[in-house]
Amino acid sequence: MKVGVAGLGKMGAAIASRLIEAGHQVTVWNRSADKTEPLVKEGAVAAATPADLARASEAIVTILTDADAIDAVFHGPAGLLSGDVTGKLFMEMSTVRPETEIALAGKVRARGAAFVECPVGGTTGPARQGKLIGLAGATEDDFQRAKPILDQLCRRVEHCGDVGAGASMKLAINLPLMIYWQALGEALAISRHLGFDHARMMDLLADTSGGNNAIKNRGPALAKMLGGDLSAAVTFNLDDGRKDLRTMLTEAKARDVELPLIERTLACFDEASQAGWGQRDGSSQAVYWSQRKK
């Protein structure tokens, strides 16, 4: 199938690589054109504009930073919707508020195209292996049309409801993870006087009821960071986590819900970012807090 991918951050690039491996004819576009080069070497074709990408593709995957980026890529002068997109399938995977996806779906459908939102849970490793968790919002017909591609990207695809439901569920699954990194940092802070070997500590915590999949996957990298090696691969940076935390709070306010733990967690992430940790992996929040001095 001819599939386009617009937005080649770490996740977008991993998704594009997976689609190439799955045998699709992949066209890629990114605002910074240099990010297309590694994918061209893998067999993708680089598009000069989003409009060119849409023209070359039957299905278009977008995974973008925020609502402003979505607006620019879809509705700009050479945006995805600037040409004839009748009959095409759009699969939008950004982490944004439900209202953003609902509004976009209306505009895409008005142009005669199908729309599925499917933000994903997981990082670059699972994305590259086709083992993400897909959280889809769509009509049943559009979901079934997108499912063969989503099944190649995800180990589990959950149809959460109509458009907007996927975005709500993505915020829900990210919420405890963001709190967890802060909680882990606090746990490490109150036990650092014990002088445990870092790898031993990660292994022990991962084997308790307070462990989760995140520490099981990131434990070895965290142990290295705790030992002073801060060169660990970044799968989802701390500043992106701050963006998601702010999105959760905005959505909660709109739904008249209080999120006191997220409010405090955002303040802690903000502090780490201001200290220069923003471009490190989101899990490094635990390392920053464990070593923080009052």
Image (spheres, rainbow, N blue to C red):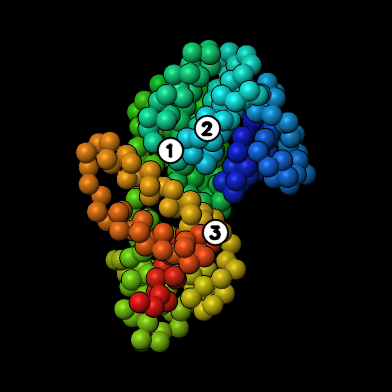
- For the residue pair 155 and 180, the one nearer the viewer reads as 180
88 over 211 or under it: above or below: above
- For the residue pair 288 and 227, the one nearer the viewer reads as 288
Q: Amino acid at mark 1?
A: Val
Q: Tell me the residue at 45%/40% (across/down).
A: 95
> How many residues crowd mark 3 within 10 Å: few (<14), some (14–19), many (20+)?
some
Badge 2 marks a residue whose secondary structure is helix
Q: Amino acid at mark 3?
A: Gln
Q: Amino acid at mark 2?
A: Ile
Name the residue carrying label 3.
279
> How many residues crowd mark 2 within 10 Å: few (<14), some (14–19), many (20+)?
many
Q: Using the rendered view, name the quadrant where residue 195 is placed.
A: bottom left
Badge 1 marks a residue whose secondary structure is loop
Badge 3 marks a residue whose secondary structure is loop
Q: Tell me the residue at 58%/62% (across/down).
A: 233
Q: Tell me the residue at 52%/29% (across/down).
A: 71
Q: Along the horizontal axis of the image, is 61 left or right of 209?
A: right
Separation (CA) of disc 3 from disc 2: 22 Å
- For the residue pair 75 and 186, the one nearer the viewer reads as 75
Separation (CA) of disc 2 from disc 1: 10 Å
Q: Which mark is residue 251?
A: none
Name the residue carrying label 1.
96
